[in-house]
Amino acid sequence: MGLPQPGIFALGNLAHAYLEFNATGGDDRDLVTALATLAEEQTTMSGITLVVGLRPELWARVAPDLAVAGLTGFTEPVPGSGGFVMPATQCDCALWVAAPRYDMVFDATVDAISRLAPLASLAHEVAGWSHRGDIDLTGFIDGTENPPISLAPAEVLVPAGEPGAGGSVLLLQTWVHDSAAWASLPIAEQEKVIGRTKPDSVELDPRPETSHALRTDQDEFGHILRRNTAYGTASDHGTVFVGFSATKETQHRMLESMAGMDGPRDALTRYTTPLTGAYYFVPSVEDLGTFAPPEDD
């Protein structure tokens, strides 16, 4: 199986940026080559990790033998109960840049935007940051059900022997928080919304039917790796959802469950609102590297 892009599993970075671009009408292969070149130039010595994702349909056009059959982007909004909607804001490619300090992220993103400018226009840019380790802005532990990093590749990568092996499906969303409404809830009510205790993330027994833990139960939908971060300012902030899975269906069924398409709506969506939503295929190092120009002798 091809090696996954290492940034998927890299831990410990405090500063992040998420960039989404739309192609400006040139040759798709030129865009993929530019992205592959950016990825190849990042090494462990730079202290920066870069994850490159492609709109699945675009990747299938330029690399049909390396593409997951039938994989598509976030092409339609996900409607839910009570007028709730998860928007579809699919773009053609995405970059996730991470580093120990934001000045490093800033320099890398300015460089990437400049170098991609002849081929793609920037559609979305979000600066993310690590909040109290694994505590998200709700005050709860995020990613409790994440598999150990040593086991995660087997759970969230396309298996060996299949087209796209070593790649992964990235779901990228931004969710803005209604922090005032959330903070007004007593801790016991917050725990019912999440479905876990706040101090130590123990599942409630029984879990409320509308709880986030139940509506996104990985034992039912399949395993994902969440690499979420916080974003924004004191007055306008939220969560960047960064989820990896071996199939799109795993995460999309979770979204439909959260929206209330097949049952009650996830109570957490009463306090957080999705602003964006896109799926990207993150090819293996080898598959993406086939588009990088050869090194000079």
Image (cartoon, rainbow, N blue to C red):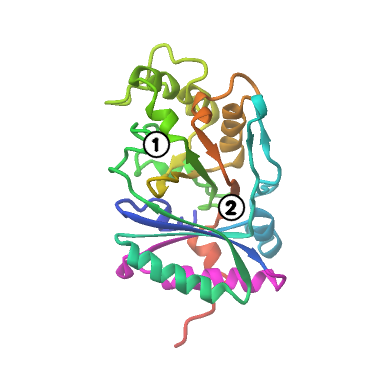
Say above or below: 110 vs 272.
below
Q: Which residue lies under the disc numbered 1?
A: 146
Say whether disc 1 or disc 2 marks the residue closer to the N-terminus.
1
Which x, y percent locates residue 268? 49, 28
Mark 2, other Cα within 10 Å: few <14 / some 14–19 / many ≥20: many
Mark on residue 127?
Answer: none
Please report the residue visible at 38 percent of the width from the left and 16 percent of the height from the top. Answer: 204
Q: Quadrant of residue 151?
A: top left
Using residue 126 as the reference point, say whether residue 58 is left or right of it.
right
Q: CA distance from mark 1 to mark 2?
A: 20 Å
Seen in the picture, residue 78 relative to 29 is either above or below; the reply is: above
Q: Name the residue at the bottom extreme.
A: 297
Q: Is residue 29 magenta?
A: yes
Rendering coords of residue 198 (x, y %): 31, 25
Decide which of 8, 230 is in the foreground and name it: 230
Q: What secondary structure is found at the residue carrying circle 1?
A: loop
Q: Is residue 245 left or right of residue 106?
A: right
Tell whether position 56 is magenta.
no
Q: Which residue is mark 2?
A: 280
In front here: 30 or 104? 104
Q: Amino acid at mark 1?
A: Asn
| 152 left or right of 260 in image | left
Residue 9 rendering spot, x and y as whole percentages: 39, 50
Tell me what residue is drawn at x 35 percent, y 20 percent.
186
Residue 181: x and y, percent?
Answer: 44, 29
Magenta residues, start to end: 24-52
Q: Quadrant of residue 239?
A: top left
* Residue 45 horizontal side relative to residue 223, left or right: left
The C terminus lies in quadrant: bottom left
Q: Nearer the viewer, residue 106 or 285?
A: 106
Q: Amino acid at mark 2?
A: Tyr
